Image: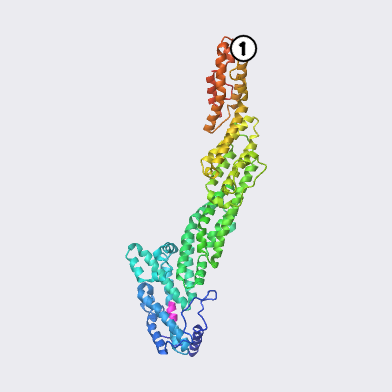
């Protein structure tokens, strides 16, 4: 029943109602939101469809159900949920509000001085207070059932499309789904989201959108913010990130990587599905709500950009690549979820972070290349072994190869420079076709080229040229082994491997010529005429001196790769032992009659094989570098 009011208040309400329901004025939601479509108001040209008595009867009929659920009453309905206790009565309540609204429109249009307008207005306020309370209760009490994760999962099911209100609201849908215990949660969520939509539609149509939106934003934003908090998403200032030690920052990066997919694909996606469903009557309202509710996404997607601004060290490229990869994977989801102008800042932040990460990664690659070129270490590796720079660079590049898919996007438009100061032979191997070779392959091959050219310069530090070629062969073989046992093989290809394997052979051949040339030349040519004892004696002496010098010098040299080591020994032995065996066999009998035979014929052919087998391990036979002795 209408409360007792003064003539002045009654006149004021009549004026308000006249303005609110006039045919020339549409219902206003808020100054910032566009007006949703409202039920048609009878125009002045339409015949009077409702007599005043019919309208009054309508108001009288709806009065009982609306006042029954007055939230300020002392009855049990004050503490009982309308939508929870009786779905049919809830539907009757909503229908009563619609009837009341139509009657008020008709009264304003045809009987604007009717006292029933005041009663209708009071009833409308009671109804809106009840719906406001129900809206709040459903949102508050059902956080688990209609949380973004569950809504997101259900929205992907064909039988639970949140856009189909009729399907959601039909009793048949609930009855069918309810027959299975496994669908209890799903049915509950569908019912709740359907109720929220029905209440929102009713309140918005009745001019109470501001109250409805305020409740929705308050509760749903708290749910989303709580979700981000539970995922470990924090709001960092740039100064905090820059001052954070790397271990702590790595922890934050790992946490972000675990959280971002859940946040984008579940939290935000589910929230959008629910928001779009509840406020399907107004695009502007749902975009405004969703924008304010998910504003925390700015903090989520700003984090990678802040990390990208940290000090650019080579080892930090890998966490940056992981951030870039994760952000790239969810970018389509971000584009789809934050597709409105009101949420464009979040989408732009994700793009900005990707750009920042890409710039930082390219800068690190450039700095890494410069570090190789500027390496000024003068320390020579004993025995011509593997240089630490070779190990460090190849390990780094092979790790980069594991991120080749992501690197392809990052270096696509930043091909490495062609440094004309590098040896021409290196620049021609491999000869890439820029139009067909992936940019990442060219870039990684370039970094290896920079390393090999640096190793060329370091090899110049060896006084013994033959040792410098052992050094080059060892280090290039190490690079080849790394390439062939990692993803680099796929990126660089067989042609690259073949051409660099040929270069190892060239290094080995040059070493053999320089290191063993004097030994080979100390023996007579093949099938020489029989030498005199004196001439044969001198030839043996020249051979002994050459072999002892070569062995003494090379006893501490090292070839770590077993296959390369064996190939070198076999190659030297094939050249040396047959020639020596022939010479030894031809002159042995003659020289046995000469005094001090064992002094100048110091080695048998088998001795040479034994000595050669002990080369390239880094130590002499006896653990020293003293000349070999006769056996």
Q: Is residue 384 visible?
A: no
Q: Describe the colour scheme in one phrase.
A: rainbow
Q: Residue 128 magenta-drawn?
A: yes
Q: For residue 530, which quarter of the picture?
A: top right
Residue for point 38% across, 73% down: 83
Instruction: Give above or below for 121 relative to 135.
Output: below
- Secondary element under disc 1, as helix, strand or loop, is loop
Q: Is residue 607 left or right of residue 147?
A: right
Q: Is residue 505 visible?
A: yes
Residue 543 pos. (x, y %)? 61, 19
Residue 440 pos. (x, y %)? 57, 48
Q: Residue furthest left?
A: 179
The residue lying toward the viewer, choosing from 373 and 66, is 373
Residue 14 pos. (x, y %)? 49, 87
What kind of secondary structure does the magenta stretch mostly adopt? helix
Q: Residues within 10 Å of mark 1 (few under 14, many from 20)?
A: few
- Quadrant of the frame with the N terminus: bottom left
Residue for point 59% across, 56% down: 356
Instruction: Give above or below for 533 relative to 210.
Output: above
Q: For residue 190, which quarter of the picture?
A: bottom left
Q: Residue furthest right?
A: 421
Residue 210 pos. (x, y %)? 50, 75
The residue lying toward the viewer, choosing from 163 and 237, is 163
Residue for point 59% across, 20% down: 526
The residue lying toward the viewer, choosing from 354 and 380, is 354
Q: Is residue 598 left or right of residue 74?
A: right
**Residue range (magenta):** 124-129
Q: Is residue 482 left or right of residue 450?
A: left
Tell me the residue that label 1 is attached to: 532
Instruction: Give above or below for 166 relative to 354.
Output: below
Q: Residue 565 magenta-drawn?
A: no
Number of numbered markers: 1
């Amino acid at each position: 029943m209408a409360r007792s009011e003064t003539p002045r208040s009654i006149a004021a309400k009549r004026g308000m109602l006249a303005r609110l329901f006039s045919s020339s004025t549409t219902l206003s939601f808020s100054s910032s939101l566009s007006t949703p479509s409202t039920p048609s108001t009878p125009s002045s040209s339409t015949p009077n469809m409702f007599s005043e008595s019919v309208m009054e009867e309508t108001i009288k009929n709806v009065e009982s159900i609306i006042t029954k659920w007055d939230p300020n009453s002392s009855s049990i309905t004050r503490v009982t949920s309308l939508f929870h206790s009786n779905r049919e009565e809830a539907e009757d309540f909503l229908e009563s509000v619609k009837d009341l609204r139509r009657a008020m429109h008709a009264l304003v249009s045809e009987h604007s001085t009717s006292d029933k307008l005041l009663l209708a207005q009071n009833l409308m306020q009671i109804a809106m207070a009840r719906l406001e309370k129900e809206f709040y209760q459903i949102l508050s009490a059902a956080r688990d059932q209609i949380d973004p994760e569950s809504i997101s999962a259900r929205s992907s099911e064909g039988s639970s499309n949140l856009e189909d209100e009729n399907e959601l609201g039909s009793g048949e849908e609930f009855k069918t789904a309810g027959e299975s215990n496994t669908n209890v949660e799903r049915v509950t969520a569908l019912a709740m989201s359907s109720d929220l939509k029905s209440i929102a539609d009713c309140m918005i149509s009745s001019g109470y959108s501001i109250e409805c939106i305020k409740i929705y934003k308050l509760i749903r934003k708290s749910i989303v913010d709580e979700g981000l908090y539970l995922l470990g998403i924090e709001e960092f200032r740039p100064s905090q990130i820059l001052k954070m030690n790397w271990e702590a920052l790595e922890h934050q990066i790992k946490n972000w990587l675990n959280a971002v997919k859940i946040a984008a694909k579940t939290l935000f996606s589910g929230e959008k599905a629910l928001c779009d469903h509840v406020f399907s009557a107004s695009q502007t309202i749902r975009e405004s709500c969703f924008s304010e509710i998910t504003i925390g996404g700015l903090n989520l997607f700003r984090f990678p950009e802040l990390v990208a601004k940290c000090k650019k060290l080579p080892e930090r490229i890998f966490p940056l690549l992981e951030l870039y990869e994760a952000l790239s994977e969810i970018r389509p989801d971000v584009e789809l979820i934050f597709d409105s102008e009101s949420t464009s800042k979040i989408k732009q932040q994700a793009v900005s972070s990707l750009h920042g990460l890409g710039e930082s990664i390219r800068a690190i690659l450039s700095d890494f290349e410069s570090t190789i070129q500027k390496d000024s270490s003068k320390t020579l590796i004993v025995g011509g072994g593997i240089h630490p720079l070779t190990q460090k660079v190849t390990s780094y590049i092979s790790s980069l190869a594991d991120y080749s898919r992501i690197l392809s996007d990052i270096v696509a438009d930043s091909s490495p420079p062609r440094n004309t100061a590098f040896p021409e032979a290196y620049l021609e191997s491999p000869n890439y076709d820029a139009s067909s070779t992936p940019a990442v392959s060219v870039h990684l091959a370039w970094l290896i080229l920079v390393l090999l050219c640096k190793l060329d310069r370091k090899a110049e530090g060896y006084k013994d040229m033959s040792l410098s070629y052992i050094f080059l062969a060892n280090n290039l073989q190490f690079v080849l082994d790394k390439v062939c046992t990692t993803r680099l093989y796929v990126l660089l290809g067989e042609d690259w491997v073949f051409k660099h394997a040929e270069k190892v052979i060239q290094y080995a051949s040059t070493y053999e010529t320089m290191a063993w040339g004097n030994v080979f030349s100390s023996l007579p040519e093949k099938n020489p005429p029989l030498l005199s004892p004196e001439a044969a004696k001198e030839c043996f002496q020249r051979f002994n001196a050459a072999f002892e010098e070569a062995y003494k010098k090379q006893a501490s040299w090292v070839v770590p790769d077993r296959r390369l080591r064996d190939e070198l020994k076999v190659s030297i032995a094939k050249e040396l032992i047959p020639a020596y065996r022939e010479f030894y066999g031809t002159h042995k009998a003659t020289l046995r009659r000469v005094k001090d035979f064992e002094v100048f014929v110091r080695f048998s052919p088998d001795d040479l094989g034994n000595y050669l087998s002990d080369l390239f391990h880094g130590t002499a036979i006896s653990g020293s570098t003293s000349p070999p002795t006769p056996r």
